[in-house]
Image (cartoon, rainbow, N blue to C red):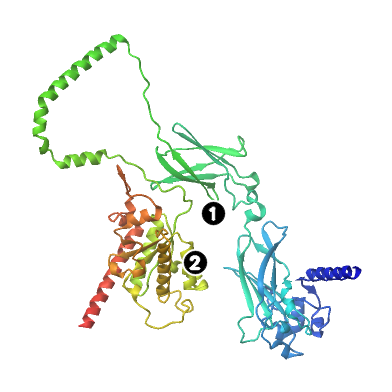
Amino acid sequence: MWTTALVLFQFSALARADSSAAVVTPQDCSLECIKEGGRACEYCRVTRDDVKKALGFNTFPVFGSCIPWPCFELLGDDDPNICQHYVQAPNDVKIEFVPETNPESETIVVSWKPSYYGIAFLRGFQVSLQALGGSSTACQLFLFHRNVSLLTSHTEMVYKSDPFPSLSLGSQYAVTVMALPVPEQWEKFYQSKIFSTRSCAEKNGLEQCKHDWYPKHIEVHQKGTVITVTFNLAPPKLGIRNYFSLCYANGMKRYTDITPNSSNNKTHHSYQLNGLQEGTNYTCEIAANEVDAVRKTFNVQVTAIQKEAAPDTPSLAVALPLCLALVAIFGLLLAALTRWRPKLRRNKFDLKPDIFRQYEESGTPKEMVSLPETRLTPPRLLMCYSSNDGPTHVKAVMQLGAFIQQHMATQVFLDLWDSLSVAEEGGMAWHCRQIQESDFVMVVCSPGLKQRPVTPQPDECDEDEEVLGLGSNAYCTEAVIQLIGEEVGRAKARGQNLSKYMSAVFEYSEETDVPAELRLVSHYTLTRDLPLLFSHLHGVELHRPGCYLKIKHITEEGFASVPAGAALQLAIYEAGMTMKAKSQHAVEGAD
């Protein structure tokens, strides 16, 4: 029994020792110790002074202690063979934020695990940090002693870098962990990760950040025709003295400049909204009058005020003659109606229909049709198309996307507008992600949609050098359409709603250009069906008893009255002329 207890105690002690050694942090040691293979130099940080002493000159300060070929330069003089082996890239790269006393910056530590491929020949790591969109760079170098030979069990060890301080808040960075040595013809020696530092509000709290501050508490009160808005003021230490409010509805905007008097109330302020129409729902924004200030959105529903006349109680001397006069008038009207009734019957069919139409149009009640209030963000629409029909067709697709985004309250996603992500993810991967994340998917069909690329290409359509050109989706279109067709067929088989998917053609295309996979979904001809497309995207009815939805900028006659609509009309005309010339050329060539 005592033997069993002793063995268990020893195993628990070993487990505690292993767990304590699971994380390896850099240690201070000289370059001579690393080269000699001393046991005290297991995982060492290499400083700029060590690099200068070994190379005889200073490196650029922005690169820290990093150099292009650290294993060859620092360890390869005595034994070049130790830097000739391939080592796989590290795994499980993680970013950890550490406490930072400076409220305007962040400090991180990078951690990772080594790969078991070539771990016996691993000589160290090089960690670099690059600010995306900027020139800021930092780099750290860590080496093992030359006699080390790690085992496969060391792949569970977590290695850490030194802290990277003074990172800007709310910025994006890319960290790269490189395994050493790095042979010249080896490509899988590093692992990169993109991360974002916390914003000022996330790190310090909203009340500590002038750039991120916005009113949190807003109350709207209406008394008669007076609308009063009350909101919380910014803390005095932020130095915000002026605010503004902007309300808009039906194409109209109302701007209100707000200058609170801090002597009256230092925490809240109330102001009045003037010039708003009764019976209208407004979307309002309020923010500090600062550059790039965050805006707080709230809704104001201006109710109609019914004006009732105060009842008067006339005296009997006045009421009695009025009653007698009304009785006399009623008798005369009854006699006249009895006399003229046959004449009205004879002239019944002589009335002109235009009179009734004018009367009905003038008397039709006007009703405001508002968008559903359950949606907090605009619907996301992915537009797919084929570039086989040339740049004029692609231009028409781009102008259509711009018009939908500007005048149909919809967020449009188009591969030409997100070329960086397409290049990074690949055409198919980008389209797959957008199909899953979008509320609606619309395929703009054209004759080129059924054409296959003339030149065979690899399966991965994102590896071609023309990823960013107009022909970026020439080899992805067929696969994307097949993917959408599978999604439609699967939804149809399960009895699910197919409203997410739709097809569209411009006026110069035919309905036969719609692939068979998309014959089950809604189809629109543009620009004739712009109101139907708007109804589809926002789930509103175009016609109701006594009213109909009419938005000037999305009708077939009025869409060209705005710059985006005029550009769309011109692009469709040019694409149609190009299509017509191409078809005529094809006919002449056949003859």
Residue 155 pos. (x, y %): 71, 76
Q: Which residue is mark 1?
A: 292
Question: Is 142 above or below relative to 249?
Answer: below
State left or right for residue 137 relative to residue 366.
Answer: right
The residue at the point 50 percent across, 69 percent down is 421
Label 2: element kind: helix
**In-image side of 479 versus 325 (left or right):** right
In the depicted structure, whether residue 256 falls above or below residue 481: above
Residue sitting at x 79%, y 73%: 27
Please report whichever mark, 2 or 1, sits nearer to the chain's N-terminal start.
1
Numbered tag placed on residue 179 in the rendering: none
Label 2 Cα crowd, 10 Å radius (few <14 / some 14-19 / many 20+) = few
Mark 1: amino acid? Asp
Nearer to me, 59 or 278: 278
Task: Determine whether 476 is above or below 547 in the image.
Answer: below
Quadrant position of the N terminus in the picture:
bottom right
Identify the residue position indicated by label 2 in the image.
433
Residue 389 visible, this angle: no
Foreground residue among 196 and 440: 440
Label 1 Cα crowd, 10 Å radius (few <14 / some 14-19 / many 20+): few
The percent coordinates of residue 400 (x first, y second) are 36, 62
Find out whether the residues at labels 2 and 1 contact each other: C-beta distance under 8 Å. no
Residue 394 percent across, percent down from the top left: 36, 70
Question: Mark 2 or 1, which is nearer the eye?
Answer: 2
Residue at (25%, 74%) from the top-left corner?
581
Q: Find numbered disc 1 in the image and state the secondary structure of the residue it sits on.
A: loop
